[in-house]
Image (tube, rainbow, N blue to C red):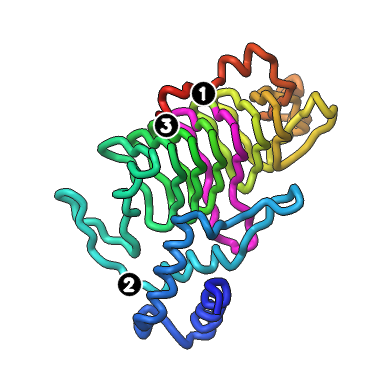
Amino acid sequence: MSLKNNISALWNQQTSGEISSENCTEEHIAILDEFLDSLESGSTKAAEKKSEEWEVNHWVKRGILLNFSLRKKNPIVYGDVVYNDILPLADTSTFSQRGTRNTPSATVIRRGAHIGSNAILMSPCFVNIGASIGDGTLVDSNDVVGSCAQVGANVKLGANAVVGGVLEPIESAPVIIEDDVSLGSGCRVTSGFVIGEGSIVAENTLLTPRIPVYDLVSEEIIYGHLPPNRRAFTRFVHSDVGNHPLFKGGVALKPAVVALDIEDSTRIAAEKEDRLRK
């Protein structure tokens, strides 16, 4: 059977109570190991773009959850600290062979995360299981890339950025950051938000489906995604709660995102330095 069919069969067996961490066999664990290897190689992904739309691979999220429900917790030693977890960290010994750097001493990459070629991961940062980091992408200091998040090629994640993860519910879409995006320091991207290719997001911008994007290019208000090749930043707009008696003068503001065309000066300021990626 294919890996997808094997994972689906394990999911049904675990859901029915036929197998658990107490009676899971070496054969079952071998399937889970193969699944994690496929995530790390990039041949399996939590979401894929098909016909210009992103689709969630629900079976992949099931495979990740099975790794937690069918394996037993074990002590794992790193340095002088004993950790207790289900999975070890990823093996990074082959990174140099494909030009990828993970700087000491706190670039934490969990087993089952994909890291592309010529990528840079600055300490400290954390990349969770199921996440994918594309070729040539920079993950800066204090960044968090959550479970199943899909970060494209030649992306720059500014320092202190948080890319949200999602494992439950199964149907929920992960955060998507397409190729050639520049995400400013302190940004937060959550709840399945999609940032279109080539966009530049100003520092400390919050992108979530609950916050409207005022796209002044298409002259519409959109939710859940930022179109390609936009310059985005936070502004505040009037909120209906201003009608409440507690708001004297009837003024209340809520956050929004404004999206514009990218000016040449902005594009130049956001250019990536090739010398860092040699």
Quadrant of the rendered image containing residue 213? top right
Query: Mark 3: which amino acid?
Result: Asp
Residue 105 included in the magenta stretch of the image: no
Q: Which region is colored magenta?
A: 157-183
Residue 221 visible in rendering:
yes
SS state under label 3: loop
Q: Residue 26: where, in percent of width, then height?
A: 34, 80
Q: Residue at x 71, y 33 (%)?
A: 228
Q: Residue 127: where, in percent of width, then height?
A: 42, 46
Q: Earlier in the sequence, mark 3 or mark 2?
A: 2
Residue nearer the viewer, 265 or 99: 99
Q: CA distance from mark 3 to mark 2?
A: 33 Å
Q: Is residue 28 above or below residue 53?
A: below
Q: CA distance from mark 1 to mark 3?
A: 13 Å
Q: Residue 237: where, in percent of width, then height?
A: 73, 25
Which residue bears the numbered disc 2?
72
Q: Earlier in the sequence, mark 1 or mark 3?
A: 3
Extreme residue toward the right, this view = 219
Q: Single out the mark in the foreground, 3 or 2.
A: 3
SS state under label 1: loop
- The quarter of the image holding the N terminus is bottom right
Q: CA distance from mark 1 to mark 2?
A: 43 Å
Q: Is residue 37 above or below residue 224?
A: below
Q: Is residue 22 above or below residue 64?
A: below
Which residue bears the numbered disc 3?
140
- The quarter of the image holding the C terminus is top left
